[in-house]
Image (spheres, rainbow, N blue to C red):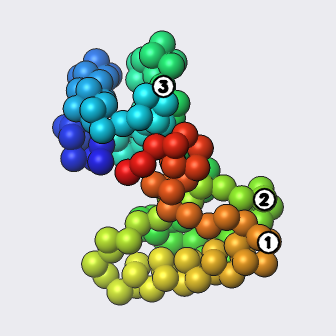
Amino acid sequence: MSHILHKPQLKQNPFSALKDVITAYVRMKNWLAPNAPFRPPRGKTHLLIMAWLKKTNKKVLWWTHDSGDTHQHMPHPQKLVDDIKKFQGGVVLMHCLHKDKVRQDYVIETTRRLIKLSIEEKYKLCTASEYLHIISGFHV
């Protein structure tokens, strides 16, 4: 949700980026539970944003593993699966809106392998929205 409620902060100065993150949070807070984790837009942050998050006691939702589906050179899907197994779970960043078939196939194959791993290792497989609900009672 935060992706569409702010200006892109990728090339902004830190003070403008902080203002946009705060604006996005203010716009969303009516829909958020008081203890709902917040992910800065696009997962991008810097020292000022981190200081604001700490000062305001915001819980932050981060991913622990990037699937690589947006990288120029995508890693082999098994590398992600091996990393998830090594760390006994994690939060995976993966996108489902790719237009080109190669990236669509990559996401499908990576997902297939993650589902297989979750069955084998008895991991709970869920979306970010479901995870938010599990850890904080927040409903999307």
In the rendered view, does 139 fall on the left or right side of 99? Answer: right
The residue at which mark 2 appears reads as 88
Q: Quadrant of residue 115?
A: bottom right
**Where residue 106 appears, x then y in whole percent?**
49, 80
Q: Quadrant of residue 118?
A: bottom right
Mark 1: amino acid: Glu
Residue occupying image coordinates x 38% and y 51%: 140
What is the distance, in whole Å, between disc 1 and disc 3 at their CAs? 32 Å
In the rendered view, does 67 fall on the left or right side of 8? Answer: right
**Where residue 14 appears, x then y in whole percent?**
32, 22
Closer to the camera, 123 or 12? 123
Q: Is residue 133 above or below residue 107?
A: above
What is the distance, in whole Å, between disc 2 and disc 3 at their CAs? 26 Å
Residue occupying image coordinates x 27% and y 32%: 30
Q: Neighbour class for label 3 at 10 Å: few (<14), some, many (≥20)?
A: some
Mark 2: amino acid: Gln
Closer to the camera, 81 or 118? 118
What is the distance, in whole Å, between disc 1 and disc 2 at their CAs? 8 Å
The residue at which mark 3 appears reads as 58
Q: Neighbour class for label 2 at 10 Å: few (<14), some, many (≥20)?
A: few
Closer to the camera, 78 or 21? 21
Q: Is residue 27 above or below residue 99?
A: above
Which of disc 3 and disc 2 is earlier in sequence?
A: 3
Give residue 121's mark.
1
Q: Are marks 1 and 2 in contact (CB under 8 Å)?
A: yes
> SS at mark 1?
helix
Give residue 54's mark.
none
Mark 3: amino acid: Lys
Residue occupying image coordinates x 78% and y 59%: 88
- Observer-side mark, 2 or 3, equals 3
